[in-house]
Amino acid sequence: MAEQITQSNEKNAAIDQKLAEAMQKTPYLGDYISAFIQRGNPPPTFYEKIDSSLKNLKKPNLVYPISENTFIHINAFASDNDGYFEYQVIGPPEPDGRLISAVDKMFAVYAGSWKPPDELQERFALVGNFLEKICVKSNSPVSYDKIDIKKAKQIAVYEKDYENLKYHFLNKRVGLGILDPFLTDPHLEDISIVGAGNVYVVHKIFGSLKCTVWLTFDDIDEMVIGMSEQFGKTISHAKPLVDATLPEGSRINIVFGKDVSKRGTNATIRRFASVPLSITQIINSKTLDAREAAYLWMVVGEGLSAFINGETASGKTTTMMGITSFIPPTWKVVSIEDTPEITLPHKNWISEVTRDTGSPSSSVLMFDLLKAALRQRPNYILVGEIRGAEANIAFQAMQTGHPVMSTFHAAQMSSLIQRLTGEPMKIPKPNIENLNVALFQAAVQGKDGKPIRRVLSINEIVGYNGIADSVMFIPVFTWDPSSDTVTYRGKGSSNLFLTKILLKRGLARKDEGSLYEELELRTKILELMIKKKIFNYYDVYDRVVQAKEIGLAAFKKELETL
């Protein structure tokens, strides 16, 4: 290995020191890089961590670690001329098949008497202890064809094979096998198994990538049936459609079988960060600007209702999660979802999830949970997504003084109103004025051709015009695509300031100007938080709480001294 690295360095002096060190430390990484360079490719750059500053690379060629023994290579020098850059997982090589077979058989005997723990980490520990118990490490190579499973209580394993065995056996028995590295990489948003062939991913920095992993029809069917055991839902040709949550929190949709999916079973996994993106991170990514966020801070802090609208993959849930840090810390919050995605820092938070058993008598629908929420006296109701008859309950909640925040599939105000008033929601147009704010977000193409997320507009619902039979609204903020900036209508543009927030605070109309001054102060505070690199979701929440406790002006002064 050392000779290969030296030869690679002599052949191409551009190899960086960090990559050379990683190759020296991890032989299989060194083998992969050496083979990659020998095919005439330039050596990749090694990054211990990657960030959004790499988005501007036209031909990315880099390696980064996602665990102690697994690396990812983003390769723009792939041989296929299909427009995709490659996503290559570099992990420990698979051990001898005879060794894996022997360990599998012994595991089947031991595991028969076990009660699997509920916690994922406990399962990993249990299976890891099993391997430690049955494997005896040898300093010299071992002939695995001589293992007698019937007589042996332990298996001799060549010490160089042991870590490879442990990696692959744990992935297979506790993890999700070939998908485990994808679920370990924090930079992935979506993982798509489109049928027999390559796996595709959406990377937070590099966009859509093609993986070198190739799956057959049988590989996919075996994998999804194994996964279904972990998330506790039956999948079969009789019940081919499944939505579920994986043990680590990702959301998966499966369509099973060739009879309904012509290229074979397909699956899409949506990743969710264990720590949500904070509002300062969202501002920093230019999804919205600081003044828009400050406006939402005021609106949410006063308990007004808002829908975060957009099409699929526009970032609706991410934006809603960022905004939730503005909900006052002492308020009782009830969240209702089909699949658990929402994470809140609030102590007085009830998280409820629908249950689909296939039987109307035992299923618990969004409609049922929203009705129950009204009896729980919440200060705020968060709904993962409103898509059906539960919209009626949501608007009833708004009417009775329970603010609601939800994501909603609509690209613009007209489509929002059409969906709300049409089947199956059938909200009367006059009732739509109970919704205070409609934010619209989209995934659009940036000037460099790469997808970016932007809040297109933030609108206030003013009321219902009976003569014209129309819902009136004011676009307080709009995004200008030509300059990639936000246009703000300015002082006096907010109807909510005048009709809602002044009233809630017990202020007179002459005090309206103070609300716009407060808006600018909150804007400066958010800009300062970004300048001071306060980005962690929970840190941002703590700062918002602190600002409420000591006052905005005092908090701004304290921020300036950091």
Image (spheres, rainbow, N blue to C red):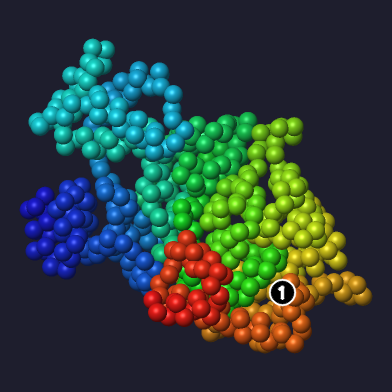
Q: How many marks?
A: 1
Where residue 200 appears, as percent x and y from the top left, is 44, 53
Residue name at image x 67 percent, y 58 percent:
380
- Which class describes the residues within 10 Å of circle 1: few (<14), some (14-19), or many (20+)? few
Visible residue check, residue 286: no
Horizontally, is 522 left or right of 533 in the view? right
Position of residue 518 relative to residue 102, above or below, is below
Residue name at image x 38 percent, y 53 percent:
185
Secondary structure at badge 1 equals: loop
Position of residue 44 relative to residue 185, above or below, is below
Horizontally, is 152 left or right of 427 in the view? left
Where residue 372 appears, as percent x and y from the top left, is 73, 45
Residue for badge 1: 505
Visible residue check, residue 378: yes
> Identity of the amino acid at label 1?
Arg
Nearer to the camera, 166 or 513: 513
Residue name at image x 70 percent, y 70 percent:
437
Where residue 432 appears, as percent x and y from the top left, is 80, 65
Residue name at image x 12 percent, y 56 percent:
5
Nearer to the camera, 182 or 367: 367
Give the quadrant of residue 259.
top right
Where residue 493 appears, as percent x and y from the top left, is 71, 84
Horizontally, is 395 left or right of 152 in the view? right
Nearer to the camera, 381 or 143: 381
For this orientation, the residue located farthest to the top is 151
Horizontally, is 135 left or right of 403 in the view? left
Image quadrant where one finds the C terminus: bottom left
Give the quadrant of residue 508.
bottom right
